[in-house]
Amino acid sequence: MNNRPDNIEKDLSEQPNFKDEIGSKNQDHHTFDLGNQSTLKKIQHFLHGNPTIVPVIILILSVIAFGFIAGGKFFSAFNLSLIVQQVTIVGILAAAQTLIILTAGIDLSVAAMMVLASVFMGKLSVEMGMPTLPAIIVGMIVGVATGAINGLLVTRLRLPPFIVTLGTWNIFFALVIFFTGSQSIRSSDIEINAPLLHFWGERINLGGFVFTYGAFLMIAIFVFLWFLLNKTAWGRHVYAIGDDKEAAELSGIRTDRMLVSIYAVAGLVIAIGAWVSIGRVGSVSPTSFYEGNLDSITAVVIGGTSLFGGRGTIIGSLFGALIVGVFSSGLSIAGLDVLWQRFALGCLIIIAVGIDQWIRKVSN
Amino acid sequence: MEPVLVAKNLSKKYGTVVALESANLELYPGEVLGVIGDNGAGKSTLIKVLCGAVRPDSGEILLDGKNVSFTSPIEARTLGIETVYQNLALSPALSITDNMFLGREIRQKGFIGKFLRFLDQKAMAEEARKRLSDLGLLTIQNINQLVETLSGGQRQGVAVARATSFGTKVVIMDEPTAALGVKESRRVLELIGEVRARNIPIILISHNMPHVFEVADRIHIHRLGTRLCVIDPKEYEMSDAVAFMTGAKEPPKSN
């Protein structure tokens, strides 16, 4: 019994030395690393600090590659502007998706939310005689509300965003079928009753390049979100939550309230996308954009945003969407079957996430 | 001299486990109060109550003589009790400046600040640089570099600079040297000295006896959920403190 305190005493006096030893070894290792940085390490560090570089490089390389494979047809003003038109909707969805993924979440319901909002806009203005602008505003509110519902479920029930949005995806999709009775609202009816819904589908010709207004709106959304994310406290908090939610909470950020607002902002962006989608497609179809959820995630991931949150840029997602567009266009001009487009896209996703994982190792 | 922070008769039970039983603590202006205790002595519960992370079942906390209660670390912080957590609570992917101002950013003046809510990133960077150089941490070259590129000691420095920057009355430091090497620990101990020199009292929780004995003015020894005694590190040996902590030796009679 008398020996015990001595032992404990000895233990305790040895403990700090033990810790210090480990610490100093780490330190030496650290300086060693810095002294002998290989080129690969330098590249890794550079990419880590500039996450948008990877998608930019992939975009440039893929444009050049398809220029060779598909020839002049690919580089025609018509084709290049067609790519931009085609990525408009997925681009807008990807912008919203980026916000969610930056918080270390994921939103499987974006496309269903968009179709639901577009159904409200179309139904109210075309079939129920509401003036178009108020109908659009109702659609926007639907977008914000459905986003907020996702956010509330994630924060209140403490469910993983994957599960919440897997659930709401199905719910929103069912609501779409319920409200429309699986019937599309025809383009000609929209043109007669609510032409404003087609506004973003209007085209302008800039020296051979044909752009829809919607494409400009998409760019505007990205620029707006860039400012929001980089120049406001709200934006910094998006990153902080995705980086380390607990640390953000301890720093004084009301993380739950923030998350709901992030999902709601994403909902608003998606609802804007709903309006643009009516112009792009012409009609309101309850079964359209069924693959929009996964396409938007693909664009974000290829754009260099980490699925683990806190890392990535909004502009990267724009490049990500463009890369997907370039691949689809290039491969189809080159005469390859659609199945190879999907094949290439799959490879691209795995490569993008692989690069992301490799870059992330820097911090350890 | 009046204490800055007083805890009186704090009690906390988790089910049938008594974590705190009528625990007391006093922190005086400008001092470093070391808090030591064996594992399970209730030391960390005491600290969690003081920083707002845990609500006590009973007892009261006085800050500058006024009764205070808080339901979250954020509330404790607004009252001037800042905590440097063991995991530092920094966001590694954000810059030093972003981290220092996280949750209390400076917005630009006029329209773009008030309505567009733009941040005044220049003012924040300048302020952050000033705070760091005040604490002798100018070795950090680029104030906008990401926190994950900093060493453990530098991160500790950023966390301490943040904790001492906003009208702070009390700083609680939880195991600040636990994850650090010899040189970095030394730097953090100097940092504690810098903070004390600016007349901000510190509660230092640590398992590292030599560190506590080196920087603490008084040492609060916690045992079985309550304060056993407070000793002056100049009058006792580390072995005495360990003996008190483990119950091998009777503590000195307190006044």
Image (cartoon, rainbow, N blue to C red):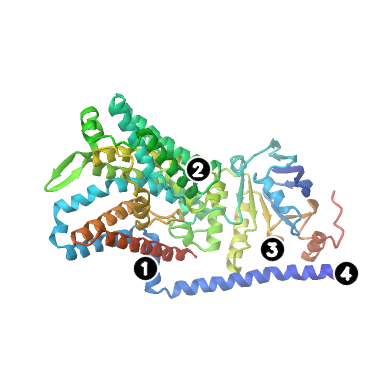
Q: Chain of mark 2?
A: B
- Tag in front: 2 or 1: 1
Tell me if label 2 and label 3 are in contact, CB under 8 Å. Answer: no
Q: Chain of mark 3?
A: B
Counting from the top left corner in percent of width and height, residue B159 is at 55, 54
Tell me if label 1 and label 4 are in contact, CB under 8 Å. Answer: no
N-terminal-most mark, 2 or 3? 2
How many numbered marks are there? 4
- Mark 1–mark 3 distance (CA, rounded to whole Å): 40 Å
Which amino acid, by three-letter code, is at mark 1? Ile
Q: Are callouts 2 and 1 both on one chain? A: no
- Tag in front: 4 or 2: 4
N-terminal-most mark, 1 or 4? 4
Q: Which residue is mark 4?
A: A2
Q: Secondary structure at mark 1?
A: helix
Q: Quadrant location of the N terminus of chain B?
A: top right
Q: Which residue is mark 3?
A: B208
Q: Which residue is mark 2?
A: B104
Counting from the top left corner in percent of width and height, residue B172 is at 64, 50
Give the vertical position of A4 relative to A285 (above or below).
below
Q: Secondary structure at mark 2?
A: loop
Q: Which residue is mark 1?
A: A43
Q: Are callouts 2 and 3 both on one chain? A: yes
Q: Chain of mark 1?
A: A
- Tag in front: 3 or 4: 4
Q: Secondary structure at mark 3?
A: loop
Residue B176 image-quadrant placement: bottom right
Which amino acid, by three-letter code, is at mark 3? Asn
